[in-house]
Image (spheres, coloured by chain):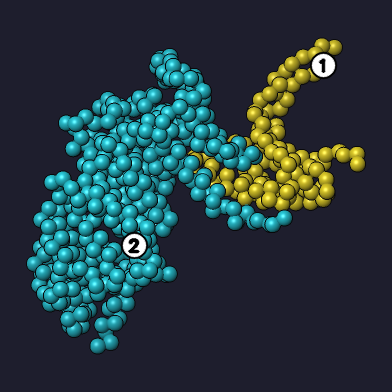
Chain colours: A yellow, B cyan
Amino acid sequence: MAQFMLLIRGGGEAWDNFVPEQAQQEYQKYFAWADQLRSEGRLHGADELKGGGKTVRVRDGQTVVDGPYVETKEGVGGYYLIEAADENEAAEIAKGCPTLRHSGLIEVREINEHA
Amino acid sequence: MKRKTGEDLQPDVRQLVDHLCRHQAGQVVATLTRLFGPQHLDLAEDVVQETLIKALRQWSYRGIPENPAAWIMAVAKHQALDILRRERRFRDKQAAILQTIEDTADTQTVFRDMSDDDLRDDLLTMMFICCHPAISREAQVALTLKTLGGFGISEIAHAFLTPESTITQRLTRAKRTIKVQRIPFALPNTAELPVRLNAVLDTLYLLFNEGYRASHGDALVRDDLCAEAIRLTSILATHPIGDQPKVHALLALMLLHAARRPSRTDAAGDFLLLDAQDRSLWDRAMIHAGLAELVRSACGDELTAYHLQASIAACHALAPTYAETDWPRILSEYDDLLTIAPSPVVALNRAVAVAMIYGPEAALDELARVREMPGMNAYALFHATVAEFRRRAGNHAAAITAYDAALRLPLTEPERRFLLGKRAECSVF
């Protein structure tokens, strides 16, 4: 088994437009998906990331601190750290994430473990 | 490791989230309304709405926290401060309101330190505000469901078969009335209490009735309405200001009806008459609770329609079978009810009691007498009842005439099916 980061990009705007009943229904879907993973012992962490943020880099020899790297709606809004046999299985699992229904996409990246 | 499916877990979570979004939301709205003032009810609702969505969004990653209610309370306070700083219309009031929030005890624990009594006081005060006599009755119901019940506008519209725009309008007008009349965040004083309490009881009764009697729409929404009415009436009944006989009578009536609800319809959703209902489906614990409330209502010197209705419901709930029902007792209660709160439904139900004691011809005589009651002739149930007694009296041709009269009037699908079935039984003769 390997570990994968599922990086959630976009899809956050939908939440901004929900009324509580919709948010509740949406939450049920996330719960169904995530809790299935938890009960299978596949989910090792997950968190929402706040929008905005800072970018630190060297420009013209100077270390500068800029604003966000990309616009919030393209940036990573959260992550799930899951266990899967391989990238294909991880991608299959990612297909169940409700963010896909709201124009979100999921970047699937394997954690590099030199076993 | 035992495999649990998402479906197994969902009902508990759905209930928990539902409870938080409805009841907790209602509690937070009430407390924020106390802090901001009733003229800023909109703000309190906005805060709670944003808080709930934030909560669910974060919980979609992390799962539900250990103490979700406390989480919601704490975030609501921060959210309130954010909105105040953001919203132009609050700029001038901002300083005063911010001061109130920041002053209250410790900045982190403004809600957490509140006792259960404090929380309940806020909820009750909000109830009296929502049911203020200056607000129209339909708006009172909508406002109660929205602010205290955590119902959404579309849910309310769906429950009452009313367009969403109408519900929105009612809510807007109600809030404007609260502003214009400067309704304060306070429980009614002794002088105002009788009128104010009656207004609350009438609204809660209407709410319950809507859930209980409605034959349209989603069964779950109707159950929610009954449950919400019972919940709010219970909170009222256990508070010193609501610990009065007629409040207990209303609660008794609600519990004794709701307890028998599971037997009212069959698997197809069609209605069953009381004689055909499976009494083993009745909620015994709820009947017990209802009877306890009835006992609590049996003091003081005010006999209300709620007392009589609760008493009648108790007669039914206590009868082991339809045949063993105490019909003479029920009849005498309907006699009283017809005096203090006459209505077509009461008259018709009374006629049923007459039929059970004196036979169908006597009941038909009664129905002939009440035919002149306003609205009676256009009431499908009147003709259906006439038809039923004619059928029992063996006058099948006349029964068919009455069934036809009923079928020409507005009916729901289950009602129509029921009457067609009965009519068909007659036409074999």
Question: At 67% from the left edge and 41% from the top edge, which residue is drawn?
Answer: A104
> What's under tag 1, amino acid-wise?
Val
Please, what secondary structure does the residue beneath circle 2 have? loop
Residue B54 in picture, x, y percent from top left? 55, 34
> Where does the image place residue B366, in percent across and percent down from the top left?
11, 69
Q: Amino acid at mark 2?
A: Arg
Instruction: Give yes or no for contact between labels 2 and 1 (Cβ–Cβ under 8 Å).
Output: no
> In the rendered image, is residue B139 in sight?
no
Same chain, marks 2 and 1?
Answer: no
Give the secondary structure at mark 1: strand
Q: Quadrant of the C terminus of chain A?
A: top right
Q: Chain of mark 2?
A: B
Q: Quadrant of residue A54?
A: top right
Disc 2 marks which residue?
B260
* Residue A58 marker: 1
Q: Position of residue B106 (x, y in %)?
A: 48, 20
The residue at the point 57 percent across, 45 percent down is A26
Tell me if mark 1 has few (under 14), some (14-19) or many (20+) residues whose alpha carbon lies within 10 angstroms of its own: few
What is the spatial separation of the Cα atoms under label 2 and label 1, in whole angstroms?
A: 74 Å
**Residue in the foreground of this view, choosing between B356 and B405:** B356
**Dot 1 falls on which chain?**
A
Closer to the eye: label 2 or 1: 2
Rendered position, B292 above or below B414:
above
Mark identifier at residue B309 = none
**Residue that appears at 43% across and 33% down:** B28
For the question of whether residue B11 can be seen, the reply is yes
Q: Nearer the viewer, residue B147 or B171?
A: B147
Can you tell which quarter of the image residue B167 is in? top left
